[in-house]
């Protein structure tokens, strides 16, 4: 029998709502916060959030609120399910209502441009040590649409404090939603963020009419880029062979549920970036993360041709087909060189 908890879910979008359903299935009480009064009223009155997950009925344990104070009142755990760019806006608004240490969980995937910080690092800056027991990340190959249908899903949790990660594992795990632990916090966050870049590229390739060969190449060589940068930043290379590496990469690059793939698909069909973002109506983390990853590649001196090609398309107006041709025309190299360098980096300080 699970130890029942009271949880604040900050963010009533598709992912926050789907995770609230998981927690509700486990018998926990969830206070889900959102700005949209109509959405919150629908959650409370009809047990639905039709804007983001149409046709899904939420457990009675999920209660909506537009008050941040009410959302965190007397809760055990605070889950942040807002986009990367909203972290520094939302967290300071929460702080006045938190007067004792809480476990904070983030479920977003991104890197902050400019500072080049991972989300857990942003949270460390914004949340005083006096009111946080720990920061835990939940990541992995998981579309909200499928989680809300209770389809089998596996994810990973990580933290500097693995006892707290295990607490969050127990909070979420059930027969539909399997949760693993991984002590490699850097690798889990970097994998979750960088796969969005490759997913945008996969969408572009599909939009251009390329086939499975191109997508297989993007996924494989994209994984090499992720591991190359991640290990340079201190991650364990084995993490990229797991759920938050190849697992998340596959699901995001191959599914129409992926907003990153959909955005890329529109770009590949000739739509302008501004038009794509307007039509999507939701945050496309891969767009913003591309800028951060480009900056990281320069900072660490890591070669990331796919990421840099997308950067040129998004921010310098390069034609997508021309960018692909440039990638294919690169000089010869050895496929195993990446693996050798990544493994060697583990023994060279």
Image: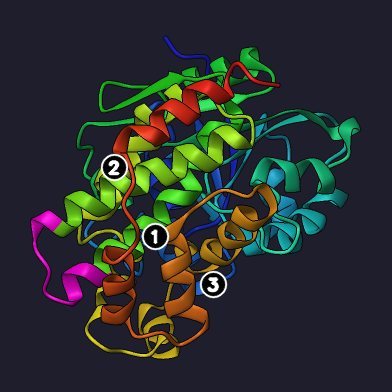
Element assignment for label 2? helix
In the image shown, does 292 or 337 lie closer to the viewer?
337
The tag earlier along the polypeptide, 1 or 2, is 2
Q: Please tell me the numbered disc located at residue 306.
A: 1
Q: Position of residue 325 (x, y in %)?
A: 26, 73
Q: Mark 3 points at which residue?
A: 37
Please state if 34 lies on the left or on the right of 263 as rendered: right
Q: Distance between the residues labelled 3 and 2?
A: 24 Å
**Residue under the image location 40 percent in, 26 percent down:** 26
Q: Is residue 5 at all visible to an observer of this figure?
A: no
Which of label 1 and label 2 is nearer to you? Answer: 1
Could you tell me if the residues under marks 1 and 2 are in contact, i.e. CB atoms within 8 Å? no
Q: Earlier in the sequence, mark 3 or mark 2?
A: 3
Confirm whether the magenta stretch covers residue 248: no
**Location of residue 110 in the rendering, given as x and y in whole percent from the top left corner:** 55, 53
Whether 253 is drawn above or below 20: the answer is below
**Separation (CA) of disc 1 from disc 2:** 30 Å
Q: Where is residue 144 in the image (x, y as percent from the top left)?
A: 33, 50
In the rendered view, would you say 89 is above or below 15? below
Q: Quadrant of the C terminus?
A: top right
Q: What element carries label 1?
A: helix
Splitting the image into 4 quarters, where does residue 8 fall? top right
**Left-right relation of 298 to 126:** left
Which residue is drawn at the image coordinates 35% and 49% (left, top)? 222
Image quadrant in which you'd find residue 305: bottom left
Give how far apart the Cα atoms at labels 3 and 1 are.
41 Å
Labels 3, 1: front one: 1
Q: Identify the mark nearer the N-term, 3 or 1.
A: 3
Colour pattern of the rendering:
rainbow
Q: Which mark is residue 147?
A: 2
């Amino acid at each position: 029998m699970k130890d029942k908890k009271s949880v604040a879910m900050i963010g009533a979008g598709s992912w926050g709502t789907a995770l609230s359903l998981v927690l509700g299935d486990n018998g926990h009480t969830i206070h889900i916060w959102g700005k949209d009064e109509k959405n919150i009223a629908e959650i409370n009155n009809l047990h639905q959030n039709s804007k983001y997950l149409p046709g899904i009925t939420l457990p009675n344990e999920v209660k909506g609120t537009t008050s941040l104070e009410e959302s965190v009142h007397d809760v055990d755990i605070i889950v942040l399910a807002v986009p990367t760019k909203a972290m520094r806006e939302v967290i300071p608004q929460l702080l006045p209502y938190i007067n004792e240490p809480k476990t904070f969980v983030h479920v977003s995937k991104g890197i902050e441009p400019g500072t080049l910080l991972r989300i857990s690092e942003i949270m460390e800056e914004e949340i005083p040590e006096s009111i946080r027991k720990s920061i835990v990340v939940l990541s992995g190959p998981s579309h909200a649409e499928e989680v809300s249908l209770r389809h089998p899903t596996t994810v990973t949790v990580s933290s500097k404090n693995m006892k707290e990660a295990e607490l969050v594992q127990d909070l979420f795990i059930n027969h539909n939603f399997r949760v693993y632990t991984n002590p490699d916090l850097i690798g889990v966050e970097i994998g979750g963020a960088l796969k969005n870049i490759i997913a945008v590229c996969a969408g572009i390739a599909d939009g251009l009419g390329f086939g499975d060969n191109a997508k297989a190449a993007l996924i494989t060589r994209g994984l090499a880029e992720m591991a190359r940068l991640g290990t340079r930043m201190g991650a364990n290379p084995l993490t990229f062979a797991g759920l938050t590496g190849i697992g998340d990469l596959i699901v995001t690059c191959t599914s129409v549920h992926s907003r990153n793939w959909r955005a890329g698909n529109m770009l590949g069909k000739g739509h302008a970036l501004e038009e794509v973002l307007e039509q999507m109506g939701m945050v496309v983390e891969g767009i913003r993360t591309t800028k951060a990853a480009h900056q990281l590649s320069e900072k660490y001196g890591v070669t990331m041709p796919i990421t840099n090609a997308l950067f040129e398309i998004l921010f310098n107006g390069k034609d997508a087909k021309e960018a692909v041709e440039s990638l294919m025309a690169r000089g010869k190299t050895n496929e195993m060189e990446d693996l050798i360098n990544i493994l060697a980096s583990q023994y060279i300080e």
